[in-house]
């Protein structure tokens, strides 16, 4: 009598097809393979709606699901097992049946300034009045207009390779562009970073610099693998930031900035605990209104960290953020309607 055993399961990780997304997926795959050498992992890459539309400003394109929707369809259909995301691109509300099961240790989450190749400028202060600075983020523009009102901020889309090529083009308009530093570091282009743009000048996007792994909620084996490579201080900090954003109902292009630090306080062998410090801000599109607050607390669970983030959002709302966000949403709706009207005129 012969017996047959089931073949070991192979786990497929998927992400967008950009160079950076592939590098990030390989970082996660390699971390899993190192801890689980007897388990097979492979990778799959696909193009998303955000990759298809490189012309319109993110402000008009409907939020973060632009980057994740097609990937989540593949995940729920079972053709892939894990999705690797830049955590800042993940909506605060996931589709039914999906969850974030793992968070890798965060790279430096700050934004950075990259000047045109050959230019001598080192900081935003060095740029001549009227210089064009490229960024696709209204969060960055809103905050920076407060201090750098004489600079001109212009939308620039595309992957990092494309943005750098547009920056360095001899006939291009840009003196500099602003990018997330983590992406530059992961691509091995840290030498192009001219200077960091951190607090108090610029608070970064929620979950910026962290990699998140999304799975099907009923996949216990995938969850166990993801937990094995999760960096809990990064997870707690990012979940506090995401809880803040969720309460504010902000999306990818809403000017919500954060800065978070968590210091581990547990003794060896004790359960996780830490001292959480979180700063959050909401800024009007032209930078004339700005609400900023900070909170600090001891946290013993990820749920306690999320509660601090949500509490911070409530304070922001009560001290002026709601009026700013209402104005932004009204402005966005007007621009969406105008864009639709323009498209109809072109088609006529």
Image (tube, rainbow, N blue to C red):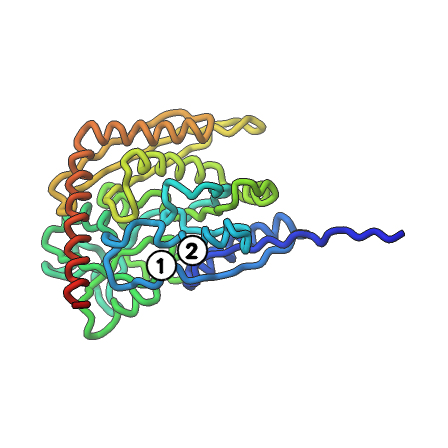
User: Can the viewer see residue 7?
Assistant: yes
Badge 1 local density, few (<14 within 10 Å), some, or many (20+)?
some
The residue lying toward the viewer, choosing from 342 and 148, is: 342
* Residue that sits furthest to the right in the current view: 1
Residue on which the image places disc 1:
49
Report whether 80 appears left or right of 154. Answer: right
Label 1 secondary element = helix
Report whether 50 appears left or right of 25. Answer: left
Q: Quadrant of residue 162?
A: bottom left
Report whether 347 appears left or right of 98. Answer: left
In the rendered view, tell whether residue 83 sits above or below residue 44: above
Q: Residue at x 19, y 53 (%)?
A: 336
Q: Position of residue 98 (x, y in %)?
A: 48, 43
Q: Residue at x 45, y 51 (%)?
A: 72
Tell me the number on the disc at residue 273.
none
Q: Residue at x 52, y 60 (%)?
A: 44
Query: Are discs 2 and 1 less than 8 Å apart at CB?
Result: yes
Q: Position of residue 69 (x, y in %)?
A: 40, 52
In the rendered view, tell whether residue 245 sits above or below residue 12: above
Comes first in the chain, label 2 or label 1: 1
In what quadrant of the picture does the C terminus appear?
Answer: bottom left
């Amino acid at each position: 009598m012969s017996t047959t055993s089931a073949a070991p399961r192979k786990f497929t990780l998927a992400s967008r097809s950009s160079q950076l997304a592939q590098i990030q997926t390989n970082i996660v795959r390699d971390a899993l393979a190192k801890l689980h050498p007897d388990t097979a992992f492979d990778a799959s890459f696909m193009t998303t709606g955000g990759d298809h539309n490189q012309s319109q400003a993110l402000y008009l394109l409907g939020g973060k699901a632009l980057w994740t929707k097609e990937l989540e369809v593949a995940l729920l259909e079972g053709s892939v097992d894990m999705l690797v995301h830049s955590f800042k691109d993940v909506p605060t509300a996931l589709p039914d049946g999906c969850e974030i099961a793992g968070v890798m240790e965060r790279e430096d989450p700050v934004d950075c300034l990259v000047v045109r190749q050959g230019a001598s400028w080192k900081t935003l202060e060095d740029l001549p009045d009227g210089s064009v600075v490229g960024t696709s983020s209204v969060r960055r523009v809103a905050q920076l207009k407060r201090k750098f009102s004489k600079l001109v901020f212009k939308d620039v889309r595309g992957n990092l390779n494309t943005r750098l090529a547009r920056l360095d083009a001899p006939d291009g308009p840009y003196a500099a562009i602003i990018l997330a530093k983590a992406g530059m570091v992961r691509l091995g282009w840290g030498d192009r970073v001219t200077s960091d743009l951190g607090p108090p000048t610029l608070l970064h996007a929620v979950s910026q610099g962290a990699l998140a792994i999304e799975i099907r909620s009923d996949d216990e084996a995938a969850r166990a693998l993801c937990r094995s490579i999760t960096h809990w201080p990064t997870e707690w900090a990012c979940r506090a930031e995401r809880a803040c954003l969720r309460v504010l109902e902000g999306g990818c292009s809403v000017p919500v900035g954060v800065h978070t630090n968590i210091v581990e306080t547990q003794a060896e062998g004790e359960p996780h605990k830490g001292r959480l410090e979180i700063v959050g801000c909401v800024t009007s599109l032209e930078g004339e209104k700005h609400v900023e607050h900070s909170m600090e607390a001891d946290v013993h669970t990820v749920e306690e960290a999320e509660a601090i983030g949500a509490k911070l959002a409530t304070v922001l709302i009560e001290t002026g953020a709601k009026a700013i966000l209402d104005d932004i949403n009204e402005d966005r709706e007007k621009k969406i309607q105008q864009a639709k009207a323009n498209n109809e005129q072109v088609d006529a």
